[in-house]
Amino acid sequence: RGEVDFRYYHNFDKNNKLATRIIVGTGYAYSNSIAMPYIKQFSIGGSNSIRAFPARTIGPGTFNINEQFPPGEEPDPDDGNTRDTRLFIDQRADMKLEGNVEFRFNIVSFLKGALFADAGNIWLIREDTDRPGGRFRKDEFLYELAVGTGAGLRMDFNLFVLRFDLAFPLRKPYLPENERWVFDEIDFTSPDWRSDNLILNIAIGYPF
């Protein structure tokens, strides 16, 4: 298992900075193992990753956990799953690609702001019949990236930074191939859209 985390920070002046990050990771289970240990597998999404999606809910590839348990349909209780538990199923895989860019600026005193965009996904090396669309394909992976954007406020108290990032998706990899960009669905005036798409991340410290 290997992972590379490359970061670059450009200071325009003392009050404005551009921060960027690229993460590439891959791992392979050998011998009689068919998967890496769970804690060694890669995940994506959340307050320090792609902030427009809940933690560990993206991927692998174009797989969509909601297709397993569609909202409004009760799964078979004999399987030990419920409609609510699908929200807590972590998606993990063997490969990861993530990129982040963030423009940071001072507002007043300890209050700072940010505009950001995140993109990435995870993939499987081996086919998994329980997660169709999850295997890495070199000619398809760029079309399977999740993309999100948003804005944030940070309270810098010197000893620690309290961060609030509000984000929403621009591209959903689990949608049909020609419908993944969702610019035309953005509607801040719609309660349903806000409920389904706006993600508020609250964290301590900067994401990278």
Image (spheres, rainbow, N blue to C red):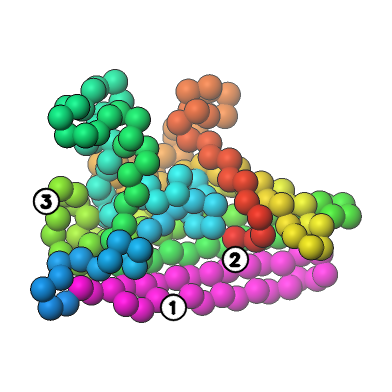
How far from the left and from the top, in percent, is residue 69?
25, 32
Q: Please give the residue where the numbered disc 2 appears in the rendered image.
A: 208
Amino acid of disc 3: Thr
Q: Please give the residue where the numbered disc 3 appears in the rendered image.
A: 129
Quadrant containing the C terminus is: bottom right
Q: Residues within 10 Å of mark 3 (few under 14, many from 20)?
A: few
Using the rendered view, name the quadrant where residue 13 is placed. bottom right
Disc 3, disc 2: CB below 8 Å? no
User: Does the image show residue 81?
Assistant: yes
Q: Is residue 31 left or right of residue 99?
A: left
Amino acid of disc 2: Phe
Disc 2, disc 1: CB below 8 Å? no
Residue 205 position (above or below residue 80): below
Q: Residues within 10 Å of mark 1 (few under 14, many from 20)?
A: few
| Residue at x-position 66% and y-position 55% | 204
Using the numbered discs, state the Cα–Cα distance from disc 3 to disc 2 in whole angstroms.
35 Å
Give the residues drawn in magenta, as a range.
Answer: 1-29
Q: Is residue 124 left or right of residue 155?
A: left
